[in-house]
Image: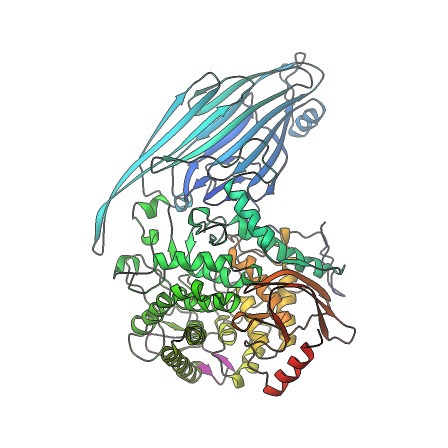
Amino acid sequence: MRREVRPASGQPDVSLVKLRPRADTLYVSSGRTVLATDRDGFIDDGPDMGLFVHETRLLSTYRYRIEDRALHPVAASNVSQRSWLGYYIAPAPLREDASCFAATAAANIYKAAQQTVELRLSRFVGEGMHEDVDVSNFTQEPVRFRLLLEIGSDFADQAETHDERRQRGRVASHWTPGERSWELRADYEVTHSYSHQGEVGVARLRRGLATRFSNAGSPPVWKDGVVAFDIVLEPQGAWHCCVDHAPIIENERMSPRYGCRSFASQDNDYDRRSRIFLDESTRFASAESDALSGVVVGALEQGKRDLAALRLFDLDCNDRAWITAAGLPLYVALFGRDTLTAAWEAAPLGPELMQGTLPVLVDWQGRASNPWRDEEPGRMLHEAHSGPLAALNYIPQGRNYGSVTTSGFFPFVVAQLWHWTADKALVRPYLEPALAALEWLDKRCDTDRDGFCAYHTKSEQGVENQGWKDSGDAIVYEDGSQTRPPIATCEEQGIVYSAKANLAEVLWWMGRKDEAKRLLHEASELKKRFNEAFWMEDEGFFAMALDSDRRQVRSIGSNALHCVATGIADKALVPRTMRRLFAPDMFTGWGVRTLSAAHPAYNPYAYHRGTVWPVEHGPFAVGAYRYGLHDDVERICRGQFEAAAFFEHHRLPECFAGHQRDDDHPFPAPYPAANSPQAWSATTVYTLLQAMLGLQPYAPLRVLFVDPFLPAWLPEITISGLRVANATISIRFRRKRSGRTDYEILSQRGLLFVVRQPSYWSMTAGLGERIGDAASSLFH
């Protein structure tokens, strides 16, 4: 049921607003397969349009017609992320009206509705695509006509669909007729000789698409890129055909996972694995009728479905250890920092993403020095693509290490897996890779030995900015000019600090106490150096970065909020930092801009120079909670959930424009190329909820900390099936009239102590407060 967003007093009525990023395109996806069509459900060789498998466009043209006339699309929509249904109508070509088409479009639509031939297309995506084609004659007379399907394949890389074509091979098409099935096969071959900074060789790519027509009410013929069916239908008669698009990747033919009428969950491996996750993950509910309560629960539940839809099944470790793509449609690939972020933020659902992400990244960890790929021993992967440009080595993104963030996040996520599971056998294999990643950060990122992690690319086609904000123009001086590497951004120092502090605790539990002490000492020293070097007293804020001369880049941006979240910010400096982040030039009312609106380089639509990124707000809320700023937590969370209320399915996109929330901007504008769903936008809502509830496990002691401060717009929420170590618990949180939030344990299986006190995240709780809260917990 659609819920209204109630306007505040004096604000415009926004009850009809429902936003959809990339509104001109329909997406159906599962795993490595993405179908991107125009709003009418067809493909016309446009940018980013097509059937893509492993980032290769296998269908570049796909359009149905009747008698060389366009069909009228009545309705076209996803049923789920992997399925889609479209209704089309055309005027029936009746005998007494040979033209069958009226003079005007309006008259033609009216005629089509009164004397209807309907085409119904049902599509099911996964390892290719199955399509049910159903034609019905809803008239009282027989009809005869030809159904035409334009079909073509160009095997472009996804990036080439809106840019210059670089790889050009040979496409060979073959039509094979049969008695019960007919197949159109397109085969593509291309060879590329490369030489990049010492990496020399010849790459070959062989991909194809086999389109099989079966169960057809009449046989098809194929000529010049058009498949044609002659159809004769009696009154109220129906015609059907199955179309299976089977990708061929390096001579291996894939089998579409779905068959006819597969809108419901099917008995295949993909759906079985998805059901395991959706059935076992934590559930969320609220009995309140408040509009925003419904949005919160809707966003939390939709996040699970989006993660399941982004699952890269080919990288599954097992049924309960898997990894997601970063986002749809541009990032259907393995991204190190994105998957690590999504994995730890999704931990309240269960440990599956952490259990699947960590071993995959260990397999991809840098082994040698390869400047073309920015690879160095110990460095963690940034991205791995499988499209033609990457496979043929035109670009280094087949295996690219151009990020410093991944190497810091990896040890942090190892610690999070420990906090949720306390499973030594599970966690121990990741200790050495985590230490190797930290060693790379210390030795390879601190070339001038000033104690700060800085980045610069060695690759001819490397990413210039390799921190959290990785677009080429993200890091700017206060006058708007570009900062050139090597650059030490403030948030990366916080990530390194958090990585060392958290991994030290895990090492201590594993009996490696000397190493634990060393890391804690290094983290402490880094924190001291950081607050001295990055703090801008006149601004009451942290510098965005230090440049190559170790001068402050004094721009005001969201980078600093990560310093609060990671705990590297000195406690005394946090209140001023938070006030600055909530100033009108930074806080839009929906969230924090990536760059101040007062900055000369500000642009509300620029990727990292003015947009609002939901993924930053989960850590932002955690940071406010760490320092006891519960009113700020509420403000952050309210803005994000009120933004989610405007988006279809309560699905926060990758980012949206940084317009101020006011009478002239009553709803947010999506970033034009935003991915949606985006894995780390889907998971940030769980971190927002954790911050409001002060919910954090400490599995080694079989403890779940809760420190709830529910706002008036979320007076009650129930979390069911939360897993910590070997225990499962369901808890209801309820806000009282006094404003205090209480909780009730509804069910529990296994040993787990629920303790009401600030979690170990907190930087403010004293010993007396902890003792008092622990005592009150005994009465629950």
User: Where's residue 35, x and y in %?
Assistant: 50, 40
For the point 44% across and 33% down, which residue is it?
Answer: 246
Q: In the image, is residue 587 above or below residue 40?
A: below
For the point 66% across and 58% down, which residue is it?
Answer: 284
Q: Residue furthest front?
A: 750
Observer-nearest residue: 138 or 13? 138
User: Can residue 536 be found in the magenta stretch?
Assistant: yes
User: Where's residue 150, x and y in %?
Assistant: 48, 27
User: Where's residue 744, x and y in %?
Assistant: 71, 68
Q: In the image, is residue 58 above or below residue 71?
A: below
User: Where's residue 418, x and y in %?
Assistant: 48, 68
- Is 212 on the left or on the right of 722, as rendered? left
Observer-nearest residue: 75 or 318? 318
Q: Residue furthest right?
A: 737
Give the residues drawn in magenta, as a range: 535-550
Asked if residue 39 shows in the view, the reply is no
For the point 55% across and 38% down, which residue is it?
Answer: 267
User: Can residue 775 be found in the magenta stretch?
Assistant: no
Q: Main secondary structure of the magenta part?
A: loop
- Is 364 on the left or on the right of 708, as rendered? left
Observer-nearest residue: 587 or 235? 235
State the image quarter where residue 94 is shown. top right
Q: Residue furthest top?
A: 96
